[in-house]
Image: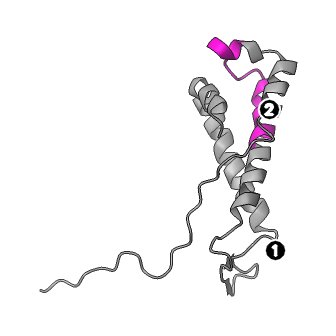
Amino acid sequence: MPQEISELAYYNKSVMYDILMKAAAQTLLVIGADLKYLVGGLSLDGKQWISCKSGFFLPVRVLSRLFRRLYLKMLSDPFKHDTLLFFGDFKSIENESQFTQWLNAFSNIKWVVYANRPFSGQRNKPTEQSP
């Protein structure tokens, strides 16, 4: 998430972290349901495991772009409902046109989605202890 959005989140933790979780969940649900992008996981009928082909459960670049779009879209709602607080430098984006322009500036920059490669095998094997 860009630094400026993180700074706005400082004053709006509850609202923006709620959006963060909803956008992350919706991103995973949308992309995970699309067979074009699903590269690993349980089949739709729940009977077969589909192996990861590219090293990740879902493509990170696609996740990043959809998450960015959803997060920015969802951030518009609390603004429209007057539930965002603006302090300091953020007072300049209190009106709708400036806020929309501010949000649009983040729609074309790269957001980094943190993703780990899937685990293979047992990570921490229990050690045998003598009686």
Q: Which residue is mark 1?
A: 35
Q: Which residue is mark 2?
A: 105
Q: Nearer the viewer, mark 2 or mark 1?
A: 2
Can you tell which quarter of the image residue 78 is in? top right
**56 is higher (above) or lower (below) than 51:** above
Q: Does residue 33 appear to the left or right of 97 in the view shown?
A: left
Q: Residue at x 59, y 23 (%)?
A: 11
Query: In this rendering, does residue 68 appear at all?
Result: yes
Residues drawn in magenta:
71-91
Q: Residue at x 78, y 70 (%)?
A: 37
* Magenta-drawn stretch contains 82: yes
- Where does residue 84 sit, x and y in percent of width and height? 70, 23
How far apart are the two marked residues, 2 and 1, measured between alpha carbons? 31 Å
The crowd level at tag 2 (other Cα within 10 Å; few <14, some 14-19, many 20+) is few
**117 is higher (above) or lower (below) than 5:** below
Q: Secondary structure at mark 2?
A: loop
Query: In this rendering, does residue 80 appear at all?
Result: no
The amino acid on which the numbered mark 2 sits, given as a three-letter code, is Ala
Q: Residue furthest left?
A: 131
Image quarter (top left, top right, bottom left or bottom right) of the N terminus: top right
Q: Residue furthest front?
A: 109
- Where does residue 39 sit, x and y in percent of width and height? 72, 75
**29 is higher (above) or lower (below) than 39:** above
